[in-house]
Image: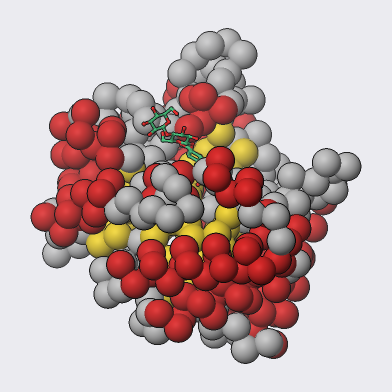
Amino acid sequence: MKINRRGLIAGGLAAIASGTLNGLPLHAASGGRRDGYGAAVTLADLQADVRLRDAVTRYCTQIVPVYELKWPTLRPSAHMFDFEKADALLDFARQNNLTMRGHNLVWYADLPEWTRQISDASSAETALRDHISTVVAHYRGKLTSWDVVNEAIPEFPRKSTERRDSLWLHLLGSNYIRMAFRAVAEVDPDVQLTLNDYDIESVGERFSARRAALRDLVSELLDTGTPLHAVGLQAHLHGELEIDTEGLAKCVAEFRAWGLEVIVTELDVDDQKLAASQAVRDMIVAKRVDDVLSAISSDVPVRSILTWGLSDRYSWINQMFPRGDHLPNRPLPLDADFQPKPFMNVISKFTREAT
Ligand code: G3I
């Protein structure tokens, strides 16, 4: 369905004027903690900005570390583990009645320099198993879920210098994925094991190809008895692209039919290519979010929705996708002054007030 900009603007702006969006009173919709809603945070930002701490404890019931559970932070060297920053985030979560999920145990990107010394299958397997067994044991019983493998689907169309040729895929082949999931389950049989990927949501050949590849990978993992419990849709949405609501709903329904949960793990909207007007951008951003959450919760509510940040003040989008007009991006539920936008009202529409 083409977005009717005029209709959207009229409807959206009228909603703001009337104080409602999708029939929800704006103030009520963006009020208290939402059960199952969470945001990605860094320890540094939380420590530096009391407004961020207050907003997280006001709106969220869970958090996920942006960086503190990744290899560069946890693994200063091949023989060292440093849990200090991730433990500090876990303490913040516990002190504020929040849960925390883990991100991520295995990724092609952002590996510390010393991993360049890993040059054969045996040492790659040892490094992978050593990392997983130590980290998962340290957090056993303390996290709700893990993004066990992040971004396993290759880029489409395949580029000559395929950036997915990661250390793990290169030295272990695609078996690294099964190996990782089994290794986590051996250490913590109770934590939710998630396969996390991106660009599954929008219209277009690239996105439908990625959806098909993810479906095939999930099917293969399940057919081989891999302990997989959930699919994480990162949902880094592109503001200028409509959501393939039909294709996404079909894909999600299939995952659920296979007994998997579907969660939203890194939701935000890149508004780089959208109009300058804040009101128009906010409406289109909210519409993209509403379309995704509607498509994946048409038959079953989504129990876990996390945005990749909470306030526009702290978003990777500002660095990675700056606007040509140099206006600040507006990718998240709260603006740079921590005020709720229509995006937050859509979150409220799909989550319940937490007691
Ligand atoms: O915290 C350190 C700081 O101490 C140091 O001085 C500074 C300079 O090196 O780096 C800081 O760490 C940065 C970290 O973000 C926290 O801000 C790293 O350099 C930087 O590489 C890291 O980038 C993150 C990136 O993942 C790689 O880990 C982005 O913030 C984060 O938004 C991005 O998130 C990814 C998800 O993990 C997977 N899905 C896509 C998503 C966006 O790319």
Provide residue 59's location: percent of width, then percent of height.
Answer: 24, 48
Residue at 63 percent across and 46 percent down: it is: 116
Q: Is residue 77 above or below residue 304?
A: above
Residue at 46 percent across and 18 percent down: it is: 328
Q: Is residue 272 above or below residue 120?
A: above
Residue at 55 percent across and 63 percent down: it is: 127
Provide residue 199's location: percent of width, then percent of height.
Answer: 65, 50
Residue 281 is at least partly visible in this image = no
Give residue 237's quadrant in the image. top right
Comparing 332 with 322, the one in front is: 322
**Residue 125 placement, left or right of 190:** right
Residue 77 is at least partly visible in this image = yes
View extreme (right): residue: 160
**Residue 224 placement, left or right of 89:** right
Provide residue 208's location: percent of width, then percent of height.
Answer: 77, 57
Residue at 56 percent across and 34 percent down: it is: 270
Q: Quadrant of the C terminus?
A: bottom left
Comparing 330 with 186, the one in front is: 186
**Residue 117 placement, left or right of 328:** right
